[in-house]
Amino acid sequence: MTDLSRPDPNTQTEAKPDAIAPPLWLLAELTYRCPLHCVFCYNPTNYTDHSRELTTAQWIDVLREARALGAAQLGFSGGEPLLREDLEVLVGEARQLGFYTNLITSGIGLTDARLDALKAAGLDHIQLSFQDSTQELNDFLSSTRTFDLKKRVAASIKAHGFPMVLNCVLHRFNLPHVDRIIDMALAMGAEYLELANTQYYGWAHTNRAQLMPTAEQLQEAEAVVNRYRKEIGERCKIFFVVPDYFETRPKRCMNGWGAVFLGIAPDGAALPCHTARSLPGLTFPNVTETPLREIWYESDAFNRFRGFGWMKEPCRSCDEKERDLGGCRCQAYLLTGDPANADPVCDKSPEHEHVVQVVRAAATRTPEQQPAKEQPILFRNDANSRRLAATGDSRPQAQDQDQAISRGERT
Ligand code: FES
């Protein structure tokens, strides 16, 4: 495996500050605390190892430094950002600085009083998540009773005049409900509906065997989406993103490492992508110790996968490398054990067969069949996080399958 704890001479010489564009998109993950326990959460499975949170003053410094660097879009996320009582203060500061602000929320805690305060503070946009169109599945997947509350919150968001994106993560359980999910979004007056098929990081990777759909499920869902798009026109814009595992070319993840995206974790760690903390050997600088400008332009963590100097074959000599930049570093690590490898979603990768086998294993079960009972679904909660953190293994279930595939065993 590539040793990430040592500076890479290739990236060090290639990534000069004057060749690096400023960040555009700042994601402020205000807290890892969350009232929901979603089985596909992208937060690190060992999030309980990072429970410290920046103070209000520290977050304000982050916003000022990021805006001075050039960031223009700001997402407040978590965990559940509404658990921070200073959210309105931070939104107000962001507004004054000229950010376009988006609140990414489960809706739990979004009372009329808070909506009033967020409106007054200048919040631009709200992205509300649902887990399904049915109470039964919504509440099961989040391990809470929140479906009715979310519906009330959606109505309040509209009543307060906010543009609303409804977000629903798709997987084996709810793909057959896509028509009803779209109907629900239309009934709620959503301007945008983001049907985001699960990508397998964090808790979703841990629960991959349970969540992975079949190709038929995806095709049927996409056909439904296309039918609705024709019927409803501009009334609601529907996004449908196919899971990476069903592609043969990787995505240009984050539009490039250290290219436009700057994430700040609740404890102040600066991250080039949401799940970068899963990569071993990289040390992520903290905003409480290092100025953001220095982090963005000069830190080893942000320079490590910029440009092309870090690439191995087959990416290094690939004529498509400028299009996809080798794909996703976190996926390369999760599936091959080395973040500097080609993303194995690419069928030019020598490890692409690994992805094919995971998809094939899902296809051998009917959608009603759940995977082996010895792999119970793991909810995102503090007890499970501590357990995973204690074993030092953030990916036990999928890892078993990944290792079996690497040994050449059928799964
Ligand atoms: Fe980390 Fe793709 S999610 S590089």
Image (cartoon, helix red, strand yellow):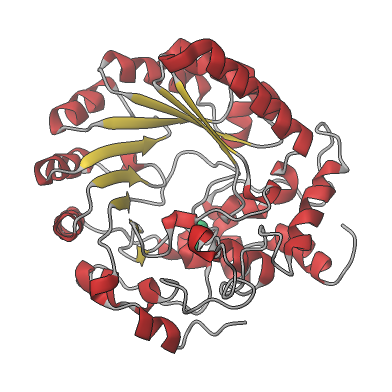
In this rendering, does residue 105 appear at all?
yes
Residue at 63% over, 68% down? 393
368 and 310: which is toward the camera: 310
- Residue 126, image x, y percentages: 33, 30
Q: Where 315 sits versus 138, above or below?
A: below
Q: Can you give x and y, in whole percent of width and height, for residue 302 in the image?
A: 37, 71
Q: Residue at x 37, y 84 (%)?
A: 12
Residue closest to the eye, 136 or 101: 101
Quadrant occupied by the N terminus: bottom right
- Residue 169 location, quadrant: top right
Q: Is residue 96 above or below residue 245?
A: above
Tell me where residue 125 appears, x and y as whole percent. 29, 31
Q: Residue at x 11, y 46 (%)?
A: 97
Residue 135 seen in this snapshot: no
> In the orientation shown, which residue stands out farthest toward the left?
96
- Residue 338 is situated, as x and y percent measured from the top left of the image, at 61, 75
Q: Which residue is more in the foreground, 282 or 230? A: 230
Quadrant of residue 159 in the image?
top left
